[in-house]
Image: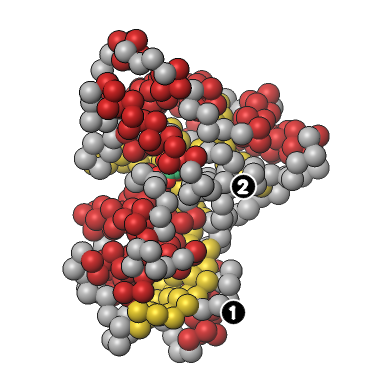
Amino acid sequence: MSAATLDPWSDEQGIARAGALFTATFGGAADGVWAAPGRVNLIGEHVDYNAGLCLPTALPHRTYAAVRARTDGQVRLVSAHLPDEPWTGRVADLAPGRALGWTAYAGGPAWVLADEGVPVTGFDAAIDSCVPFGAGLSSSAAIEGAVAVALAELAGLTLDEALAARLARICVRAENEVALAPTGGLDQAASLRAHADHGLLIDFVDESVRHVPLDLAAHDLQLLVIDTRAPHTLNDGQYAARRSDCDRAAALLGVRTLRQVEDLTDALSRLDDPVLVARVRHVVTEIERVRQVVALLAADRVRAIGPVLDASHASLRDDYQVTCPELDVSVEAARSAGALGARMTGGGFGGSAIALVPRGRVEAVAVAVQHAFTDRGWRSPVFLPAPAAAGAARVG
Ligand code: GLA
């Protein structure tokens, strides 16, 4: 049995697809095509909204937006997934509480950009993507990022590190205020600010970043993404519930964010609620695991990060309680078949896992995970290659 792999599109394919949808829907040609990637998080899960540290990489899988500026204030949006239902309105119709469904992700950045004083005089956008939806791989941040970069450049701004950081913040506002998903900034930062062949170390105290060299191939390793295809959503209340646990614990401990907890043993002894004890233990130990991984990478001890990934998964399963049977089975089967470490990645409650695998074992690991799923009567998972790719940019 061979395992199903979802390869990324080349930029040529993405440009052709978004461009063809644009012409079929709106007529004429776009001014350009912009792309933004999905992401995986190597380590640092559910800590971004606790002012923690995260180490994501961008996927080679990208969302493509073919965009043409308008001068009459109109906005027209179309998605390849709903080609017969283009949306037409004005920037003001993309305000919080007005835009619904995918329009909120595609159009939300336009409203926030305008709200922040960047001129948005209307536009047409056609969007196509090879980032799987609902897989915990930030398909929503990829849509937001592609549109945001397009509109910023069409407004005359130049995409440099500072603009990428600003657009990441703008996309977080779009996600929180327009799409009403109370997420932190991990996904948008990864999609807009990542560099190829590097992990993006983000410090959410001030959103500063460091590009950490990540050359897994040099160590004969590969990061394999396992999309469990177990449904995953970030606006069904569970994600928000974890955030409010953290806020409550921080208030009880007298700190502004859990990042400020210095003595974990002391902090845990001051909390009565066992649920809050577990949540705080996850957040504080996970931030420490990010430091460990960064130190191991700096020392070129890449294989040694495997056990740290395993510890992260255990903490997310037992203390943070955001895994599910499909994620737990994925990581166990991957390890049994030779992965050096594995963990869920992203928000959890379904979605995807990652496994650090010696290159010669990739197929065996994928097949073992697939068997574990079919044995249980579950839908087959999908596997994605995940070399660290580049963040959002104009591609055509
Ligand atoms: C989702 C959110 C992020 C982050 C992760 C968990 O991906 O969008 O902000 O909180 O979950 O690390």
Q: Residue at x 43, y 34 (%)?
A: 242
Residue at the spot of label 1: 84
Going by the numbered disc 1, the residue's amino acid type is Asp
Q: How far apart are marks 2 and 1 (CA)?
A: 25 Å
Task: State the image quarter where residue 394 is shown.
Answer: bottom left
Q: Is residue 312 above or below residue 200?
A: above
Q: Which colour scheme is used?
A: secondary structure
Mark closest to the chain's N terminus, 2 or 1: 1
Disc assigned to residue 231? 2
Name the residue rendered at 75%, 33% in the picture.
372
Dot 2 lies on which element?
loop
Q: Residue drawn 60% across and 54% down? A: 7
How far across and down, in percent of the image, does residue 327 sit?
62, 34
Residue 23 in sight in this render: yes
| Position of residue 376 in the picture relative to residue 262 (left or right) | right
Quadrant including the C terminus:
bottom left
Q: Is residue 276 left or right of residue 366?
A: left
